[in-house]
Image (spheres, helix red, strand yellow):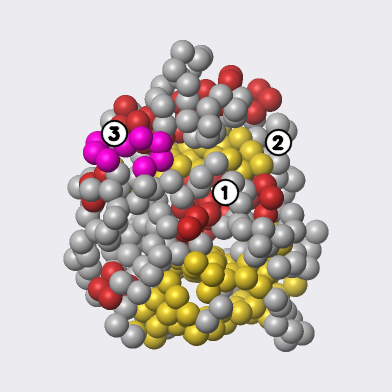
C-alpha cells in the first residue's frame, strides 16, 4: 500500500436535515447534529442491514475495486452493504474533478467549493448531492489522497485505517458514490455516502451485535495510523505522536442501542501474540461511556461509536481484541473477543 499523504477535512460531516438538526433541505457546510436524538426507527429482530446489493456498473476498474473493497470491509465488520447510487456518483465525481483542477485549498475545507472556479458544482457535499438529485436523510463525505501515482483503490484502505473517516465509512448509510482524481491528483478519492429521506431506519445491526473493524479474521496491510495526517486530528493530549497503531472501531448502534440509547464499556483492550496488553486510548462518541472512555467531540455526528487506538504502531503479527459492554437497557454484547492480523511489510 502506498504511503498516505493526507486525509482531508471532516470525515464525520453528517447531515440530519430530516431530523430537524440540519437546517432544512439545503444545510450549510457541514451542519451540526440534531439537538436531540431522532425518533427511534422501527427495527425487526434481525436489524435492518442490507445483506445484498446489485453489482456495480462502473466502466472504470478503480471505482469497481473501491466499491468492492469498501463493501467487503463493511460486510466483515457487520455494518451492512452499500448500494451504488448513480446520483451520489455524480456528486463524488464532480467534486473529484473540482479538486483535480483547483487543488485542496480553495475554501476553508477540502469538502467545500468556491463559486466561479472551474468545475464548481456546489458549495458543500450536501448541496452537491441534492443538486445531483439525491434527497437524503443522512449523508457524509470522505476524501483521501495517497499521492499521484496510484491507479488502485488503496485510498479506501488508507481511509479505513483512521478514526473519524473510518467511522463515517462504517456508519448507517445505505448508498455510495465514488470519484477519483486525475492528473497530479490521481491518487485522490472522494466517497459520498448517504441514506435516502424515505429510509427512516437506515442500517442497524441486530440485538447483541456490533460493528467492528478490523473485524475477526481480517488482515490489514500495515499497523500504523498516521495520526497527524487525519483532519480533524485526535487530541494531541491523548495521542501526542505523529503515528499510532491501527484504530479498532466499534459501533454500538444496534437494535438495543436504538431502543435504549446508551452503551457502557467495561473493557476494551488489545493484546499481542505474546499476551501483552498494549497501551491504548479509548475515544467515545455521544451516549458511549464507561471505564477509561474519553469523550470525543469528533465522533458526535454518528452516535454510538467508540475507537481504541494503540499508542504505538503495531508490528506484523496477530492481535486479540477484548470488548465487554452493555447496550441499551443492559443487553450484553454477543461479540466479546476477536483477532486480526497485521501483514508483514
Q: Position of residue 190 (x, y in %)?
A: 52, 37
Q: Position of residue 289 (x, y in %)?
A: 45, 75
Q: CA distance from mark 2 to mark 3?
A: 33 Å
Which label's residue is closer to the chain start, 2 or 1?
A: 2
Mark number, residue 232: 1
* Disc 2 crowd, CA 10 A, few/some/many (<14, 14-19, 20+): some
| Mark 2 or 3, closer to the camera | 3
* Disc 1 crowd, CA 10 A, few/some/many (<14, 14-19, 20+): some
Q: Is residue 25 magenta?
A: yes
Q: Can you tell which quarter of the image residue 187 is in?
A: top right
**Dot 2 and dot 3 residues touching (CB under 8 Å):** no
Q: Residue at x 48, y 17 (%)?
A: 119
**Dot 3 and dot 1 residues touching (CB under 8 Å):** no
Mark number, residue 147: 2
Q: Which residue is mark 3?
A: 26
Q: CA distance from mark 3 to mark 1?
A: 24 Å
| Mark 2 or 1, closer to the camera | 1
Provide the major secondary structure of the magenta segment: loop
Amino acid at each position: 500500500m502506498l504511503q498516505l499523504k493526507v486525509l482531508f477535512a471532516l470525515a464525520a460531516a453528517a447531515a440530519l436535515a430530516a431530523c430537524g438538526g440540519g437546517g432544512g433541505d439545503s444545510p450549510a457546510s457541514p451542519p451540526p447534529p440534531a439537538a436531540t436524538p431522532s425518533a427511534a426507527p422501527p427495527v425487526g429482530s434481525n436489524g435492518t442491514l442490507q445483506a445484498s446489493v446489485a453489482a456495480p456498473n462502473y466502466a472504470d476498474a478503480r471505482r469497481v475495486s473501491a466499491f468492492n473493497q469498501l463493501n467487503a470491509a463493511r460486510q466483515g465488520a457487520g455494518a451492512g452493504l452499500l448500494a451504488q447510487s448513480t446520483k451520489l456518483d455524480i456528486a463524488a465525481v464532480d467534486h473529484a474533478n473540482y479538486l483535480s483542477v483547483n487543488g485542496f485549498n480553495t475554501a476553508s475545507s477540502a469538502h467545500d467549493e468556491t463559486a466561479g472556479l472551474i468545475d464548481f458544482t456546489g458549495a458543500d457535499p450536501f448541496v452537491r448531492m441534492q443538486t445531483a438529485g439525491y434527497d437524503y436523510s443522512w449523508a457524509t463525505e470522505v476524501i483521501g489522497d495517497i499521492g499521484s501515482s496510484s491507479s488502485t483503490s488503496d485510498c479506501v484502505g488508507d481511509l479505513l485505517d483512521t478514526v473519524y473517516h473510518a467511522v463515517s465509512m462504517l456508519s448507517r448509510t445505505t448508498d455510495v458514490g465514488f470519484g477519483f482524481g486525475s492528473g497530479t491528483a490521481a491518487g485522490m478519492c472522494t466517497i459520498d455516502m448517504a441514506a435516502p429521506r424515505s429510509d427512516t431506519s437506515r442500517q442497524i445491526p441486530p440485538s447483541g451485535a456490533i460493528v467492528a473493524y478490523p473485524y475477526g479474521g481480517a488482515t490489514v496491510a500495515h499497523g500504523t495510523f498516521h495520526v497527524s495526517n487525519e483532519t480533524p486530528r485526535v487530541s494531541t493530549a491523548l495521542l501526542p505522536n505523529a503515528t499510532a497503531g491501527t484504530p479498532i472501531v466499534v459501533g454500538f448502534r444496534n437494535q438495543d442501542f436504538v431502543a435504549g440509547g446508551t452503551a457502557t464499556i467495561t473493557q476494551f483492550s488489545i493484546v499481542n501474540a505474546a499476551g501483552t496488553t498494549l497501551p491504548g486510548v479509548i475515544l467515545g462518541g455521544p451516549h458511549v461511556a464507561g471505564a477509561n472512555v474519553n469523550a470525543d467531540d469528533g465522533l458526535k455526528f454518528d452516535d454510538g461509536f467508540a475507537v481504541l487506538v494503540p499508542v504505538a504502531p503495531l508490528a506484523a503479527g496477530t492481535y486479540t481484541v477484548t470488548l465487554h459492554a452493555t447496550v441499551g437497557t443492559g443487553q450484553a454484547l454477543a461479540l466479546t473477543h476477536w483477532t486480526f492480523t497485521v501483514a508483514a511489510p
